[in-house]
Image: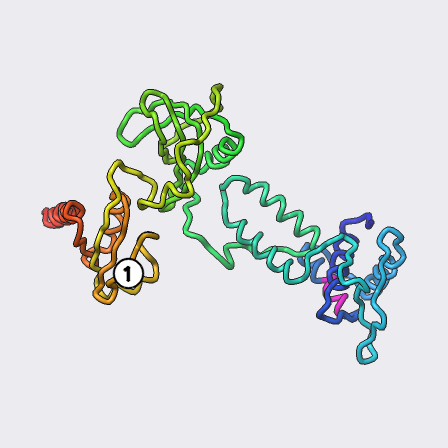
């Protein structure tokens, strides 16, 4: 094996070229590929003679047993390719297309700052860059997600993730808005993001709650392991838990069939981006759609966001609630 980082980078670049079954790599192409890898790693370029020496060194390395394809000439020019299409000195089973897909995945993962295992992801990215001789561009230059890296509580994501995986109960200090803080032992089950906010769902028997609790991370003031036996989740399947309502707040109300009339100018947006997975568009030509959900505060916030372009037709209690919101908003704007 090579005994320097620079030699490793050069051999990695050459190995990728020799493994390519589509493109012919002549000596000038190999030189370009090697120097591109070196430049991506902030290293100086090398000469054609160095690349030729590296090729001979790879052939003479008894541990690698490099064998090039024959005949290896195209139009009188020699190209370099492994005889075995599955061979690699690194035992690398990724072809060029798979490597590009891997780079895209790594670029995507780099977006999730502050999420569990993010530091480990960064380490893996560095290892892959060293192994395969590429450098990822800045993720902000090609893709962006609707996230708030300044939101409170993000520092708890990683420890909560680890606690869920290891089934570790937690002693949590929690402070609701406008109410005194309290302490609770929580058995963590699930983490969910909604509207740029993160929530912990778990079970507690602290006397204040005796059911599934929903804690926004930005209201958690501290947490630490609790020396109690973990209570397994036998209460719900979180893959199905959120199916019947919008957001993260599950009320005690029954599922209702909510009929909405959407203004024609907004209708294409609602049809292409449903308000909820339960949305049915049986009378879409009339601007009528239906949802089957449990009414909660997140549902009303969603409906109110459409302003005068949305009208609740049924049921009567949801329509009345929307009318009350509209009346209060009107009163606010009439105040002098």
Question: Residue visible at 69% across and 51% down?
Answer: 130
Q: Is residue 240 above or below residue 57?
A: above
Q: Using a 10 Å C-alpha cutoff, classify the residue at mark 1 as few (fewer than 14 neighbours), some (14 to 19) or many (20 or more).
A: some
The picture places residue 94, in percent across and down from the top left corner, at: 68, 57
The picture places residue 328, in percent across and down from the top left corner, at: 13, 45
The picture places residue 268, in percent across and down from the top left corner, at: 30, 65
Write down the residue under mark 1. 281
Q: Is residue 172 left or right of residue 126?
A: left
Question: Residue visible at 34% across and 62% down?
Answer: 272
Q: Is residue 222 left or right of residue 132?
A: left
Q: Is residue 209 magenta?
A: no
Q: Is residue 150 left or right of residue 252?
A: right
Q: Is residue 205 above or below residue 134?
A: above
Q: Secondary structure at mark 1?
A: strand
Q: Is residue 31 magenta?
A: yes
Region of the chain picked out in magenta, as a range: 29-35
């Amino acid at each position: 094996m090579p005994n320097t980082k620079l030699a490793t980078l050069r051999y990695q670049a050459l190995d990728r070229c020799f493994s390519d079954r589509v493109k012919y790599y002549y000596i000038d192409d190999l030189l370009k590929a090697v120097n591109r890898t070196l430049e991506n790693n902030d290293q100086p370029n090398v000469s054609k003679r160095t690349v030729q020496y590296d090729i001979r060194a790879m052939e003479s390395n008894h541990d690698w047993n490099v064998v090039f394809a024959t005949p290896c000439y195209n139009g009188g020019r020699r190209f370099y390719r492994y005889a075995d299409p599955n061979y690699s000195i690194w035992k690398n089973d990724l072809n060029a297309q798979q490597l590009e897909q891997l780079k895209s995945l790594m670029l995507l993962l780099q977006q999730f700052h502050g999420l569990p295992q993010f530091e480990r992801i960064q380490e893996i990215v560095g290892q892959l860059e060293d192994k395969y001789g590429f450098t990822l561009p800045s993720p902000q230059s090609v893709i962006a997600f609707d996230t708030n890296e300044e939101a409170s509580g993000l520092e708890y994501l990683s420890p909560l993730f680890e606690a869920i995986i290891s089934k570790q109960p937690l002693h949590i200090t929690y402070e609701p808005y406008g109410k005194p803080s309290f302490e609770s032992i929580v058995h963590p089950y699930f983490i969910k993001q909604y509207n740029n906010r993160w929530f912990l769902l778990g079970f507690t028997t602290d006397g204040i709650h005796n059911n599934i609790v929903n804690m926004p991370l930005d209201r958690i003031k501290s947490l630490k392991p609790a020396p109690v036996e973990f209570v397994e989740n036998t209460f719900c399947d979180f893959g199905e838990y959120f199916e019947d309502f919008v957001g993260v707040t599950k009320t005690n109300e029954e599922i209702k069939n909510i009929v909405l009339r959407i203004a024609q100018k907004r209708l294409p947006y609602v049809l292409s981006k449903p308000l909820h997975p339960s949305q049915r568009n049986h009378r879409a030509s009339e601007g009528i759609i239906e949802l089957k959900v449990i009414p909660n505060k997140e549902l009303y916030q969603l409906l109110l966001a459409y302003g005068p372009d949305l009208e609740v037709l049924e049921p009567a209690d949801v329509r009345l609630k929307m009318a009350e919101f509209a009346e209060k908003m009107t009163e606010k704007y009439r105040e002098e």
